């Protein structure tokens, strides 16, 4: 019998990293820390729910980007769904086995990410706001190793700015190979996801997580909009305040989307 799909999902909100690109296209992250990211995130959640949020500082030519990331998936699952808010423009760039896809995201649009792909969000905010991402992943196997920043040929740095710069450079380099060096491009993706799959293949907890998730019906949801609406309804003044105070139960920095409100922590899995 199906229960509640949110019981099985990894979901919440994030404010992507703010960066500038230098003359050579390399990422230069704007200075920040957990306290500042928590405040930024709480402000955008307040604005999303119709509250009186203070205007965000204007940052000129800065972009908001996610960490380039991917999931190997287990039997083609889970799918991930993203919705971007407060953007003047937003693009989801995806390295797929067939080549590069660039999706221009409209406000309120839900985009689907499949396993075996590397994705990066790149966006600019509306005046007085910061870009905000709502996300839902159909199960919680990313917490068990079924997800990773894209860093195929380098040791992954610990510090967020170095990690962002390194993963962005790897993303750009691999993207440039898609047309001119197709075999190299395909091989990089296969190696990246193959190593991830090998690490989790023997982990019984991953398969148990998906079995439990399947019983909730999370993989069978046709219309994701009601689940995103229910996610938004969890944003009470108390939850927003706790996020802004960097409550460790709800807030994490750094994450794939910078500062993250981990709303799934309010909805413990069965």
Image (cartoon, rainbow, N blue to C red):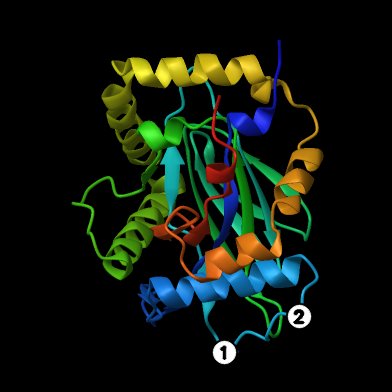
Q: Residue at x 67, y 28 (%)?
A: 5
Q: Nearer the viewer, residue 49 or 152?
A: 49
Residue 6 percent location from the top left of the image: 65, 34
Quick check: 154 left or right of 70? left
Identify the image quadrant of the C terminus.
Answer: top right
Quick check: 86 left or right of 270? right
Residue 35 percent location from the top left of the image: 42, 75
- Callout 2: few (<14), some (14-19), or many (20+) C-alpha neighbours within 10 Å? few
**Which of the two labelled residues, at mark 1 and mark 2, occupies the earlier sequence position?**
2
Distance (Cα) linking label 1 and label 2: 23 Å
Secondary structure at numbered mark 1: loop
View extreme (left): residue? 155
Mark 1, residue position: 60
Mark 2, residue position: 52
Identify the image quadrant of the N terminus.
Answer: top right
Residue 14 vs 224, above or below: the answer is: below
Residue 60 vs 145, above or below: the answer is: below
Residue 143 percent location from the top left of the image: 40, 37
Q: Residue at x 35, y 56 (%)?
A: 173
């Amino acid at each position: 019998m199906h229960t509640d799909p949110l019981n099985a999902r990894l979901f919440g909100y994030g404010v992507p990293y703010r960066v500038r690109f230098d003359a050579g296209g390399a990422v230069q992250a704007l200075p920040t820390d957990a306290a500042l990211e928590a405040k930024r995130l709480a402000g955008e959640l307040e604005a999303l729910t119709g509250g009186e949020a203070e205007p965000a500082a204007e940052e000129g030519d800065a972009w908001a980007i996610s960490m380039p990331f991917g999931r190997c998936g287990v039997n083609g699952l889970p799918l991930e769904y993203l919705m971007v808010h407060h953007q003047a423009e937003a693009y989801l760039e995806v390295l797929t086995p067939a080549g590069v896809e660039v999706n221009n995201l409209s406000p309120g649009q839900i985009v689907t990410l499949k396993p075996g792909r590397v994705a990066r969000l790149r966006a600019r905010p509306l005046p007085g706001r910061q870009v905000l991402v709502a996300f839902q992943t159909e199960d919680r196997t990313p917490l068990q190793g079924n997800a990773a920043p894209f860093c195929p040929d380098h040791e992954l740095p610990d510090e967020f700015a170095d990690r962002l710069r390194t993963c962005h450079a790897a993303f750009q380099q691999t993207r440039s190979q898609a047309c001119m060096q197709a075999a190299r491009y395909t091989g990089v993706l296969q190696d990246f996801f193959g190593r991830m799959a090998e690490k989790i293949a023997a982990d019984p907890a991953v398969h148990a997580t998906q079995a439990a998730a399947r019983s909730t019906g999370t993989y069978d949801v046709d219309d994701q909009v009601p689940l995103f609406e229910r996610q938004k309804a969890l944003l009470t003044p108390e939850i927003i305040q706790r996020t802004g105070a960097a409550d460790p139960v709800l807030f994490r920095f750094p994450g794939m989307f910078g500062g993250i409100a981990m709303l799934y922590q309010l909805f413990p899995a069965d």
